[in-house]
Amino acid sequence: MDMDIELLVKRAQNKDKEAFGELFDLYYDKILNYVFRRVLNTEYAKDITSNTFLKVLKNLDQFEWRNGSFSFSGWIFKIATNEVNQYFRKQNRYKLIIDDPYFKEIGDDNKVAEEIEKKIDNNKYLLILNKAIKQLKPIYQDILHLKYFEDMSYEEISQVLNKNESTIRVYSKRAKEELKLILEVDASKFLENI
């Protein structure tokens, strides 16, 4: 599989449209899932994912295969993470978009996005968790999403975020500690309202 991806990347760098199409097919759902879990809005997730792949296409010539099997995947996730962070900076907000009354408007043929929305909609605990994560610093959000939702190793996360692996481990520990405190406060508020 790794050799296949490396070959596809080389072919795509040589302007092979079919190779880029195959790379797009391999990574689109993964990136869309990742972005959606960050912004919790189908339309924004699709826009950000599209921007991600436009940047991949535009900068593919500059990509160099490093760090073995994770090299290309890490590069795409890094671009997606930067696009998500840019989206939040442009929106000038770090709030949970699920509170938006227009969130329920789907009108979309994209089955992947619909499945993600159904899973989120049906899992109130995931909503509470996402709301709590949104209260953390952006770097902590990135680390938690990559570690626990994308199942990446600390080494892979360090490549995606361009940080030392030991720094990622320290940030991960701090993020979990802060998240625990936020969830404890939210849980006590929830119990008070019962």
Image (cartoon, rainbow, N blue to C red):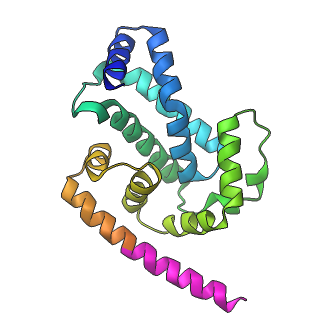
Let me know if residue 185 is in the magenta part. Answer: yes
Q: Position of residue 74 (x, y in %)?
A: 34, 38
Magenta stretch prevailing secondary structure: helix
Q: Is residue 123 left or right of residue 48?
A: right
Q: Position of residue 12 (x, y in %)?
A: 39, 13
The residue depicted at 19 percent of the width and 59 percent of the height is 166
* Image-quadrant location for residue 148: bottom left
Q: Is residue 147 above or below residue 62?
A: below
Which residue ends up furthest to the front in the rendered image? 1
Q: Position of residue 117 (x, y in %)?
A: 68, 49
Q: Quadrant of the C terminus?
A: bottom right
Q: Quadrant of the N terminus?
A: top left
The residue depicted at 50 percent of the width and 24 percent of the height is 24
User: Magenta span covers which residues?
Assistant: 177-194
Q: Is residue 8 left or right of residue 36?
A: left
Q: Is residue 190 above or below residue 164?
A: below
Which residue ends up furthest to the bottom in the rendered image? 192
Q: Is residue 16 left or right of residue 157?
A: right
Let me know if residue 107 is in the magenta part. Answer: no
Q: Position of residue 89 (x, y in %)?
A: 48, 52
Q: Is residue 97 above or below residue 129?
A: above
Q: Is residue 11 left or right of residue 44?
A: left
* Image-quadrant location for residue 11: top left
The residue lying toward the viewer, choosing from 183 and 84, is 183
